[in-house]
Amino acid sequence: MKPELRVSILSDYICPFCYIGHKRLEQLREDYDLKIQWCFIEIHPETPPQGQPVEHLGYSASHWRNLMQNLQRLADEDHIDFAEHRFTCNSRKALLLAEACKPLGTEKFYALHNAIFDAFFIHSQNIGDETVLRQLAQQNGIDKDIIDQAWAGDYTNGPADQTPKALLPYLQYAGSINASSVPTFALGTTLLTGAVATSALRDAAKKMLAR
């Protein structure tokens, strides 16, 4: 029997470092019965549904170049393939859809969860597009009623300065632990920020379970 390991992670589907972090966290399943609480944080609610070039995010050219070089280095370390990261999307509907699928069980949740990440970072699809999300959901066995329910609440379509009720607890949780960026991993009282090395996650897990 593998020991149970509970981890919370603040994450957004449009964050490439969250994608790397997700892949690295999954490696802990080799040694642990991993129970992950995905805390969905929308990092760019101002992005229009049709998406926009990454230049509109407000980073300087040199800062963005450094970010992408660091991202590529991390991806190469773990043999992760990426499409060129040239545009970003509005992630609100993707986050709401994934949240609505949690009660369906881990198998269906992770099928959709992985499909959304891959759609954006490997296939360069606009995961802010409702049609794209419906197709991903239906391909992974999510009923139309669940999809409709996911987007039935207030603020599904904005405005940017309002947080949907389903996602609000995660924003409050982030504030309670003083987390200001994604990805942030919480293992007990230990917080790790960024696409940290798998070894750092393993060390935190050992310390947490040793207490």
Image (cartoon, helix red, strand yellow):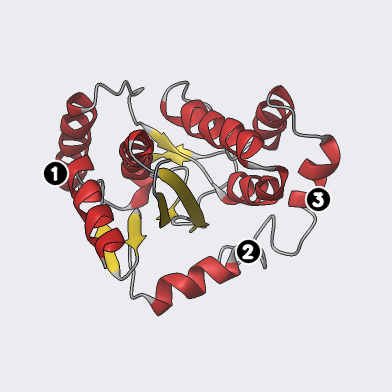
Helix, strand or loop at label 3? It is helix
Residue under label 3: 149
Question: Distance from label 3 to label 1 (Cα)?
Answer: 42 Å
**How many residues crowd around disc 2 within 10 Å: few (fewer than 14), some, or many (20 or more)?**
few
Q: Position of residue 183 (x, y in %)?
A: 34, 53
Q: Nearer the viewer, residue 26 or 5?
A: 5
Q: Nearer the viewer, residue 196 or 120?
A: 196
Residue under label 1: 62
Residue reaching furthest right?
Answer: 145
Q: Position of residue 3 (x, y in %)?
A: 39, 48
Q: Is residue 162 above or below residue 147?
A: below
**How many residues crowd around disc 3 within 10 Å: few (fewer than 14), some, or many (20 or more)?**
few
**How many residues crowd around disc 1 within 10 Å: few (fewer than 14), some, or many (20 or more)?**
few
Residue at 62%, 39% in the rendered image: 109
Q: Position of residue 166 (x, y in %)?
A: 66, 63
The C terminus lies in quadrant: bottom left
Task: Find residue 83 and report its image quarter.
Answer: top left
Residue under label 2: 159
Q: Nearer the viewer, residue 207 or 165?
A: 207
Q: Amino acid at mark 1?
A: Ser
Residue at 34%, 33% in the rendered image: 30
Q: Position of residue 106 (x, y in %)?
A: 61, 40
**Going from the N terminus, do you reach mark 3 or mark 1 first?**
1
The N terminus lies in quadrant: top left
**Going from the N terminus, do you reach mark 3 or mark 2 first?**
3
Helix, strand or loop at label 2? It is loop
Q: Amino acid at mark 3?
A: Gln
169 vs 182, left or right, is right
Helix, strand or loop at label 1? It is helix
Pointers 1 and 2 in contact (C-beta within 8 Å): no
Q: Is residue 7 above or below residue 127?
A: below
Q: Amino acid at mark 2?
A: Pro
